[in-house]
Image: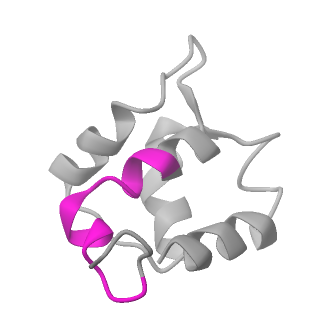
Amino acid sequence: MTELLGSVMKTRRPSRADMGQVNVHDLDGVLANMGIYLTDNEVQQALEYAAVDEDGKVNLNDFVKGVKTIPLIAGAEGYPGKQ
C-alpha cells in the first residue's frame, strides 16, 4: 500500500495539486483519482497529520502520511508494517 501511495503521489496531475498543496474541499476528488475512498471519519484522522493553512489548503504529502496510519489501510495486504 505504501508503494502504491508513493507511486500515485509521483504521478498525480499538477492541475489538481499546486506544489503539493490541495484545497481541503478537493481531498475527496484527489483521493478518488488515486483509487482511495475514505469515510469522513478517516479523512478527519488523516487531517491530524496535516495542518490546513489560511487558504484552506493542506500539504498532500503530510495528508498521505496520515492516511497511512489509518488502521484498515495500515493492515492491508502489501503494507510493509503488516505482520
Please determine whether, in this image, residue 20 is positioned above or below residue 50: below
Left or right: 18, with 44 as reference point: right
Please, is residue 43 above or below residue 24 in the view? below
- Magenta-colored stretch includes residue 62: no
- Decide whether residue 73 is among the magenta residues: yes
Give the image location of residue 82, x and y in percent: 30, 76
Residue visible at 27% across and 79% down? Answer: 83
The percent coordinates of residue 81 (x first, y second) are 37, 68
Image-quadrant location for residue 22? top right
> Residue at the location (45% across, 42% down)?
25
Q: Where is residue 36 drawn, in percent x and y?
A: 42, 73
Magenta extent: 65-78
Query: Residue reaching furthest bottom?
Result: 77
Q: How many marks?
A: 0
Q: Image quadrant of residue 8?
A: bottom right
Q: Which quadrant of the figure has residue 66?
A: top left
- Residue extending furthest toward the top: 54
- 63 left or right, relative to 60: left
| 46 relative to 53 in the view: left or right | left
> In percent of the image, x 56 and y 16: which residue is there?
53
Q: Is residue 13 left or right of residue 34?
A: right
Q: How is the image coloured?
A: one colour
Give the residue displayed 20% in from the left and 70% down from the top.
72
Residue sitting nearer the eye, 69 or 83 = 83
Looking at the image, is 66 positioned above or below residue 31? Answer: above
Observer-nearest of 14 and 78: 78
